[in-house]
Amino acid sequence: MKASRIAAAGTVAGATVLVLSAPAFAHVSVQPEGEAAQGGYAVVDFKVPNERDNASTTKLEVTLPTDHPLASVMPQPVQGWEIKTTRSTLDKPIESHGEKLTEAVTKVTWTATGDGIEPGYFQKFPVSLGALPEDTDQLVFKAVQTYSNKEVVRWIEVPQEGQEEPDTPAPVLELAAADGSGTHDAAASSGSEADDTEAAARTTEAAGDDSGGSTDTTARVLGIVGIVVGAAGVAYGVLAGRRRGSTA
């Protein structure tokens, strides 16, 4: 009896753990494709799992942070989904490529044109973002997920450091530190190597040209020497024949 009670208690405890931990594994999240570095550009994927057994996800709304507005927001087309971007006037203009922008995209909405995300599946929604801010190490994107049965789940709670994850956490994009010696130096190094290679090729070509010129000159000198030697031989033969004729 005691063993069966323990087993039953263990089963209930295990089920409780699964139920309580489910939100931690099945919520709307955002992850970069590669690295999202401060001051750079990145493609990020908003991953949306379907958490219902009797309904499909038919709409996703992602609100971009207004405290760190992004000059460039370009969603990638997703088959079976219609995409809409909403622009808003900024409290403070931002500078991008030497120009001041007073508006920016503050929301991206995906609406299913078909069945949407059915039970047991998830969908990724890629977006190109930039330039990423340099004065923060994370960006919070509040999201709203709508199901085909009209149920709405708001993933808008901001996780706090040192506290347990909320039930409906907002997607958070972690930003890597800016690398000042990254792409620019690599490009410069590549350009330097290319210049060195080109210079070496030119030197080799020049050396080849000089070698060819030296060979031609040598051939000409040898030809002239041969002619002179041949003429001397003929003259010597003529003189020798005359001497023999005089002796006879």
Image (cartoon, rainbow, N blue to C red):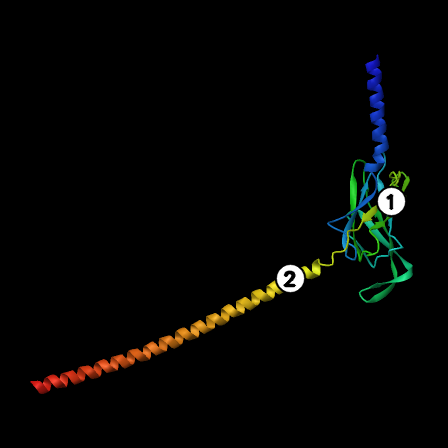
Residue 246's spot in the image, x, y percent? 10, 87
Query: Mark 1 or mark 2, which is nearer the start of the sequence?
Result: 1
Residue 31 in the image: x percent, y percent? 78, 46
Residue displayed at 11% across by 83% down: 244
According to the image, label 2 marks what residue? 189
Q: Tag 1: Cα neighbours inside 10 Å, few (<14), some, or many (≥20)?
A: many
Q: Which amino acid lies under the numbered mark 2 shown in the image of this protein?
A: Ser
- Residue 112 visible at all: no
- Compared with residue 84, is residue 150 higher up or lower down, i.e. above or below? above
What amino acid is at disc 1? Ala
Seen as rendered, the residue at the extreme bottom is 246
- Residue ID at (85%, 16%): 5
Give the secondary structure at mark 2: helix
> Is the residue 148 above or below the residue 96 in the image?
above
Could you say which is closer to the camera, residue 207 or residue 108? Answer: 207
Can you give x and y, in whole percent of width and height, for residue 222 in the image?
A: 33, 76
Q: Looking at the picture, does residue 120 appear above or below residue 46? A: above
Of the pair 16 and 174, the residue shown nearer to us: 174
Q: Quadrant of residue 25?
A: top right
Residue with the mark numbered 1: 170
Residue 1: image location, x then y, percent: 84, 12
The image quadrant where one finds the C terminus is: bottom left
